[in-house]
Image (tube, grey):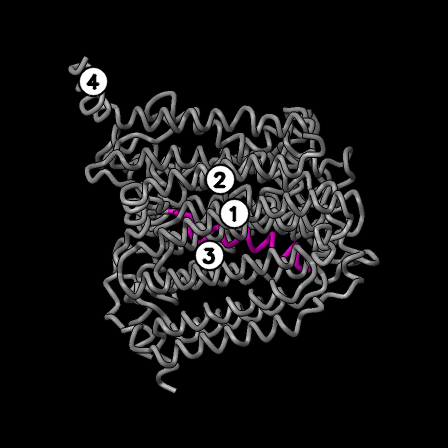
Amino acid sequence: MESMLHITTLHYLVLGAGLFLLGVIGVLTRRNVVIVLMSIELILNAVNLNLVAFSRMWGGLHGQVFAIFIITDAAAEAAVGLGILIAFFRNKETVNIDEVNLLKW
Amino acid sequence: MTPVATPFFFYLLSGIMLIGGILVITRKNPVHSALALIVTLLAQASIYLMLYAPFVAGVQIILYAGGIMVLFLFVIMLVSIDRSMKERQFNSQWVAGLVAATALGGLFIGVYTKGTSIFPEHAPSVVADNNTQEVAKLLYGQYMFAFEIASLLLLVAIIGAVVMAKKRI
Amino acid sequence: MGQIVQYIESYLNTKGLTPGYAGNMFWVVVYIMLVFAGLSVAVIAMNWLERKILAHMQVRLGPMRVGPHGLLQPIADAIKLLLKEDIMPAEADGLVFWMAPLIVVLAAFTVFVVVPFGPEHAITDMNIGILFMLGVSSLSVLGIVMAGWASNSHYPLIGALRSSAQMVSYEVAMGLAVVSAILMTSLNATGTGTLSMIGIVQAQLAQGEWFIFKFFPLGLIAFFIFAVAMVAETNRAPFDLAEAESELTAGFHTEYSGFRWSLFFLAEYSAMIAVSSIAVTLWLGGWLRPFPNLLSGTPWNQIFSLVPGVTFLFFAAICFYNTARMPKHPLFRVQTIGLAGFGAVLGLVGLILFIPPVSMRVQDIFWFSAKVAGFMYLYIWYRGTFPRYRFDQLMQMGWKVLLPMGLGVLLCTGAVGLRSEIWNQVLVPLWQRL
């Protein structure tokens, strides 16, 4: 029990892994595109948590700088992804990714 | 600044994050999922504060919770969700998805139990008060090139989003 | 028991630290209670002041009946709002409808954790103070979007979309103006600036001039951009298209009644006070009295330390003058006695503020509050004077006028601040090379 009371880096990494798994389950099992995009944001946040935890462990701030870049990147990707979603919705009137099958043979 | 009740706050915040994550992937209404994601992001900002990264926490609150989630909520409101709420919510391949996620989880457990020696516990370094200044020195010094590329990326994303969402190009 | 007293006293003996920094949880809670109480009193006073000042600007009297000169009107309003029926529209999303006012109120009140009322009179002094304030105040956009969505009716939805689009647009201009003020904090010996609110005011003290006058006119233009953007950010006139009654019934809070509506109203006034605090801290020298370096020395300090007491005695004198002007009719007896009592209370507070120990501790808080009160008067003045902007004019101004101005001010501030480096290390070698 004492090992659970002293919070080490491993605790943060396990938390990040848990979030990553939840995000992966969301991407693989949901049909609504908006929720898939939100699960991708969960995955990116899990990676950020890992980076900042390691940055605390090693003492340098490189992990935090990398995390800032990832947050910027996630903003850009969310904007473009939602733009694609709007364009797709305008054509097909649905937000179901199972219906994106025009190229299926 | 001495830390106060670290285990309590860590378990509380990680519980909030995991419950928020579960709510994101299981709710039928996308607006509820977005709200759960906002709660998760704010809890994550608090965990960044626990990891002595106040600047990343501030950036997370402004950009993620205050910017990206507003964008998500706008798009959810523009896209009519009533039809999608009445349809089946989960994929037809959900079993394969869960098996893949379980395999990944097993991999994580294997790494974290067998490889505990690769996460040595350093003595926590003395935390100075100038986190923002040190991050700025790194960002504008060593990572200047990456900073410029990131701003170029944001420009491309702005133009791309405008072009994708226009009615007539 | 002795340990508890020692814990409480240990903070009083540490000089120059806010309770959050000193890690003293008891004093943190005490400060939070004080700030919360002060904020509530300020919102109530703002309600009364807005109605009276608008009325006098429009050559009418405003509320006169409820208390003497309408002083008890805010209390009557609060009781009315508490007793109103709590309506939720049918088919409205219950959870989201309930949470939206909470998010807006939380965002508006959490901002006050870092507002510096004095060099150690803040709840805490975060390293990222100004970033925290901007970030948390941007969370209120989420509450507004949720409120409009959950009402399940098209007027609130359009109002919420317009409000949130306006707030997000003007946040960009606000951020640029704030960054150009932060740049000015780095003009010190070590060359590094600071984002902490207390550090910004101390930088103004060390550099000897308030940032609004620095690099004239750059500080002034940055202040002007922030002053316009903060009025648009809080959805106040002349940018209040989204909640004006003649346009969209009441915008995103149409379907809210009673206590929930009063939460939105409370959050709006708190947000006004919060962004005014940012403006005062960044450009107007925070808690510093006028001319801290020019008119320094003990005699000037003593003269300026008399100002809080004199201000309250002035208000008490106004109350007594109006008591004398009240109609001498038996039906007005209660109001006359009430006004005289209120004047007596103000006079007593003014006399207490003359006592030296109280006066020394209250100095910084008084000057900060006086400057924020000035901004509140400006807000009411704008509402009484300017016609409303149409929504496309509003968005045009945010993106096409304030954003380029903000970028220009930022570039010029950076260039002027580094002018000696640019001259010596770039231009002179270039000239020698040619």
Residue type at mark 2?
Leu
Classify residue C427 by image quadrant: top left
Whether residue C257 can be seen here: no
Residue type at mark 3?
Leu
Q: Is residue B2 left or right of residue A75?
A: left
Q: Position of residue C298 (x, y in %)?
A: 22, 37
Q: Position of residue C120 (x, y in %)?
A: 33, 52
Tell me what residue is drawn at x 60 percent, y 43 percent: C339
Secondary structure state at the residue bearing disc 4: helix
Q: What numbered label is drawn on residue C34?
A: 3
Mark 2 and mark 3 residues within 8 Å of each other at the beta carbon: no
Which span of residues is magenta-colored? C98-117
- Alpha carbon distance from label 3 to label 1: 38 Å
Question: Which residue is disc 1 drawn over?
Answer: A75
Q: Is residue C95 left or right of residue C320?
A: right
Mark 4 Cα-neighbour bin, 10 Å: few <14, some 14–19, many ≥20: few
Mark 3 and mark 1 residues within 8 Å of each other at the beta carbon: no
Classify residue A64 by image quadrant: bottom left
- Return the chain for callout 1: A
Question: Which residue is disc 4 drawn over?
Answer: C430
Mark 3 Cα-neighbour bin, 10 Å: few <14, some 14–19, many ≥20: few
Q: Position of residue B154 (x, y in %)?
A: 49, 39
Whether residue B7 can be seen here: yes
- Alpha carbon distance from label 4 to label 1: 40 Å
Question: Which residue is disc 2 drawn over?
Answer: B154
- Return the chain for callout 2: B
